[in-house]
Image (cartoon, helix red, strand yellow):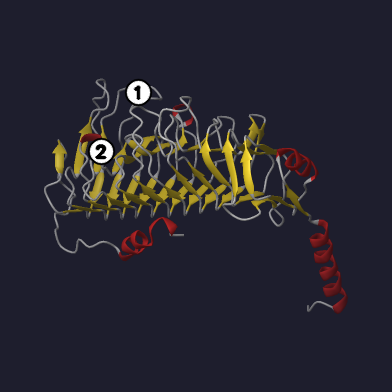
Amino acid sequence: MLPTMRSIHAFLLLLSAIASSAAETLVTDAATFDSAAKAAKAGDVIILKNGEWKDARLRISAGGNEDQPLTIKAETPGKVVLTGDSRVQLGGGFILVEGLFFKDPAGEECIELRIDSDEVAHDCRVTECAVVNTLPAGGAKKSSRFISIYGHEHRVDHCRFEGKTTEGPSMVVWLDAEQKAPARHRIDHNYFGPRERLGKNGGETIRLGDSKTSMLEGRCVVEHNIFEKCNGEAECISNKSCGNLYRRNTFLEVSGTLTLRHGNRCRVEENAFLGNHAKGCGGIRLIGEDHVVSGNYLEALDGDKERSAFCFMLGIPDSPENGYFQVKNAKLVNNTVVDCKSPFVFGFAGDKKATLVPENVYADNIRFTNAPLDGYADQKGFLWDQKDLKRPAWIDQREAAGPSWK
């Protein structure tokens, strides 16, 4: 049945009422932000005035809804510069944060998607923001993070993170043992820039979960990101939860690996690892059960042992939650390894107690340019083929675009 003029008019009046109820508020400091945050409602826009915001603590518990998010944005993207111990904390849901620039952060967090353990955000988006440290190492010694993601259904996209020198991952996804559903965050189209070697654990660029929550379902998607010279430690990405997807990311001269450290049933699909023969560059390291690694392209990686192009770890019998679980039921399909120092390590011991050999590993159509096997791998199931070893076109297109690619 076609709508009547009366029903169309009523609908337009409703839209007008919704639009008129939303407000835009320009705030000039943390105090005026706090006042605006307390009065904010769905559809409102809080605009931060251009300039330096030093030691600004911006906290908001209000939220929007799926059709009308609550927006916090810079007056001009990149011109609102948060310095010192500045922090943005979100509670509630459906909040959009856009265009903020954290420079040389000195606090424990820059962006935190919770107020506290009792008030955790959901369905929020952080987009076109940047956290950049330009100061040399040797300043703040305490552990810190650029962004901590709590709750569920968040998206972090088209952001820039680089220059971290302190202990602690640049980005952490935190899972809660009491959560009733998977986290389902999406981390996409971001640039993760250079991070110098930390010299100990805690230098990850992204960590999804931790040892204590590693058997929980994350089901996060990490895709279309660029990682360049993220050399903080051996694990550029440290997977510590189940069911996550890593797809079409590019790793440029990264002295480390995408490590499935804890958790099961993850997928690593169509990523590009381009080492350019820089020192220590690695590929994919596997621990745990039921992982699928397919369609990845690995070129000119000079790492070995745990930083090999592919590394399957030995498991510890009755492993503790922070140990090494046995590799079981892994599938490698349609991967290409070109000009890598150590293409394939099967059974590397990361602990003296690790004795369990990877079990039921299925490999099909894996292409190498030189003999790949270190350790005691069974060659059955591999395709020894040096033909058609060309980069997929999308890798060259992305590399040419550089850090500005979106």
Q: Nearer the viewer, residue 85 or 391?
A: 85
Residue positioned most to the left = 371
Dot 1: what SS? loop
The location of residue 69, given as percent across then percent down, is 69, 53
Residue at the limit of the structure toward the front, as seen here: 51
Q: Nearer the viewer, mark 2 or mark 1?
A: 2
From the image, tell me which residue sits under label 2.
307
Residue at image point 27% right, 23% down: 351
Query: Is the residue marked by circle 2 packed among few (<14), some (14-19), or many (20+) residues within 10 Å?
Result: many
Q: Position of residue 382 (x, y in %)?
A: 18, 50
Specify whether 257 is left or right of 388.
right
Q: Is residue 359 visible?
A: no
Point out which mark residue 405 bears.
none
Residue at the farthest right position: 6
Q: Pinpoint residue 199: horizontal percent, then vertical percent.
A: 33, 28
Total labels drawn = 2
- The amino acid type of the residue labelled 1 equals Ser
Q: Quadrant of residue 117?
A: top right
Give the structural element (helix, strand or loop) at label 2.
Answer: helix
Judging depth in this view, the residue of 147 and 385 nearest the camera is 147
Say whether disc 2 or disc 1 marks the residue closer to the N-terminus: 2
Dot 2 amino acid type: Arg
Location of residue 334 in the rendering, given as x and y in whole percent from the top left corner: 27, 56
What residue is at 34 percent from the left and 59 percent from the top? 399
State the quadrant of the N terminus: bottom right
Question: Is residue 347 shown above or below 320?
Answer: below
Residue 94 lies, with reference to residue 174, above or below; the image says below
Q: Is residue 3 left or right of residue 322?
A: right
- Say which mark, if any, is on residue 319: 1
Q: Within 10 angstroms of label 1, few (less than 14), some, or many (20 or more) residues?
A: few
Q: Is residue 9 visible from the viewing direction of this image?
A: yes
Residue drawn at point x = 21 percent, y = 47 percent = 277
